[in-house]
């Protein structure tokens, strides 16, 4: 049994309209009956016109009218309750859809989006199992699988034109199948592998700019068959999902560009200042020790990490033989800020780079900020950079041993460095971290 057209394809609005028409017919019948009775006994012309009808006692007529009225009110109540139930059921599903849509729009990771789409689709349609396929080349890959036999097929693939999912992918049209045994498009190979019995299917394409990028397939509705309303809701959900996936892919591409550009800049810094080879990554490592110890939020930790990697990017615009001349050296935070602040995915770390040579006592540069006027991340970087400069064998200075470097940090706590952050670092750093 495949998808039907015509009368069986009723939307919720059509269903409500039909029930309201029935209520109107019941009300009209009662009114017309009462009017006919009144006219017969009150108006002589009407009485003569229907004289051929047998006489009926007024009591019997009143009884019939009362019965019809009671029956009408009863039918009105029954149909009204059905309408209310239909509206409430549909409203609940729409509320669910709106909540899911909001969550999808707020999510930036594609794998999380796909998982939410699958969970919501199963919940909305009361399906026993389901899958999301994404097209890669000529195949449909099982990206998300939920149900009893999910583990057995997750990550596998089927040819793009094979089975109901393949048909939907090729034709870009949703499809309901109430009985898979009677549909020649159904492919039983997956059932043969898993031992699962697929009886009914609802399959909807994931469209991005009119191009099919994947398919949502739901199996075995727990009560009855998949309805037109099920198809409409999942089609709407698939449209929202495609928009969210597009945004997530853009975000992932942007992060990919950010990582590659950061690597390129790091290599350039190491070439520009070979004696500080690996310095930026070590500063990021030491800063991370402090960030974890103070339970810094993950988003801030990411920002701190990238700021550490690029804190010396300003040296790329200073001649190599001028790197350690004070008047040029002191310019590199401001130069770095100017270099990366116009780049969207670096804009939020530019202020941290600008302030990483400020001192807690206000005697730093370039702006002479003090105490909490300096960003927390910049205060952390100042400690991490100073520690690496003291202990690193590739430093431009004679390296200190671990204990001497820690003592030097403590000696300058409250003046050059935030005393609280120094205490956190000293209590969490170990000689093994220098390896």
Image (cartoon, rainbow, N blue to C red):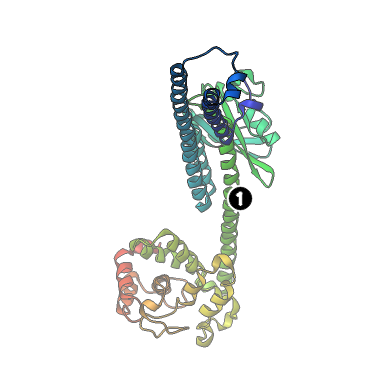
Q: Residue at x 46, y 33 (%)?
A: 85
Rendered location of residue 382, percent (x, y): 41, 74
Is residue 178 something that shows in the picture?
no
Rendered location of residue 178, percent (x, y): 58, 23
Task: Left or right? Give the position of 248 relative to 95.
Answer: right
Q: Mark 1 highlights which residue?
A: 246
Rendered location of residue 294, percent (x, y): 33, 63
Taking depth in this image into account, of 363 and 59 the one nearest to the observer is 59
Circle count: 1
Task: Left or right? Give the position of 62 relative to 412.
Answer: right
Location of residue 70 with respect to 308 vertically, above or below: above
Q: Quadrant of the C terminus?
A: bottom left
Task: Left or right? Give the position of 103 relative to 21.
Answer: left
Mark 1: secondary structure: helix
Res. 228 image quadrant? top right
Location of residue 14 with respect to 191 vertically, above or below: below
């Amino acid at each position: 049994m495949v998808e039907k057209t015509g009368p069986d394809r009723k939307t919720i609005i059509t269903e409500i309209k039909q029930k309201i028409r029935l209520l109107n017919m019941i009300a009209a019948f009662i009114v017309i009956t009462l009017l006919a009775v009144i006219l017969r006994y009150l108006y002589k012309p009407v009485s003569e016109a229907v004289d051929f009808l047998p006489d009926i006692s007024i009591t019997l007529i009143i009884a019939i009218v009362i019965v019809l009225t009671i029956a009408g009110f009863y039918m009105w109540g029954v149909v009204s309750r059905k309408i209310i139930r239909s509206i409430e059921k549909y409203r609940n599903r729409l509320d669910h859809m709106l909540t899911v849509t909001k969550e999808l729009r707020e999510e930036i990771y594609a794998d999380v989006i796909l998982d939410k789409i699958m969970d919501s689709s199963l919940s909305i349609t009361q399906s026993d199992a389901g899958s999301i396929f994404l097209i890669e080349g000529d195949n449909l890959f099982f990206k998300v699988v939920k149900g009893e036999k999910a583990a057995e097929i997750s990550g596998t693939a089927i040819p793009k034109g094979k089975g109901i999912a393949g048909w939907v992918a090729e034709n870009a049209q949703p499809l309901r199948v109430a009985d898979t045994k009677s549909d020649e498009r159904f492919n039983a190979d997956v059932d043969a592998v898993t031992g699962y019995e697929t009886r009914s299917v609802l399959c909807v394409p994931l469209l991005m700019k009119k191009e099919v990028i994947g398919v949502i397939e739901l199996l075995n509705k727990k009560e009855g068959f998949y309805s037109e309303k099920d198809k409409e809701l999942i089609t709407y959900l698939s449209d929202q999902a495609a928009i969210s996936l597009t945004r997530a892919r853009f975000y992932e591409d942007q992060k990919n560009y950010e990582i590659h550009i950061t690597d390129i800049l790091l290599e350039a810094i190491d070439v520009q200042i070979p004696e500080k080879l690996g310095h930026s990554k070590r500063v990021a490592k030491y800063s991370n020790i402090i960030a974890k110890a103070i339970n810094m939020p993950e988003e801030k930790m990411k920002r701190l990490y990238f700021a550490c990697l690029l804190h010396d990017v300003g040296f790329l615009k200073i001649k190599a033989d001028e790197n350690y001349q004070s008047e040029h050296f002191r310019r590199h935070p401001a130069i770095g800020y100017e270099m990366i602040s116009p780049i969207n995915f670096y804009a939020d770390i530019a202020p941290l780079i600008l302030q990483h040579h400020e001192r807690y006592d206000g005697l730093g540069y370039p702006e002479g900020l003090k105490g909490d006027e300096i960003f927390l991340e910049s205060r952390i970087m100042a400690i991490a950079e100073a520690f690496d400069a003291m202990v690193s064998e590739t430093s431009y200075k004679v390296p200190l041993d671990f204990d001497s470097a820690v003592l030097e940090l403590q000696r300058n706590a409250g003046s050059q460095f935030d005393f609280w952050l120094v205490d956190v670092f000293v209590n969490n750093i170990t000689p093994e971290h220098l390896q």
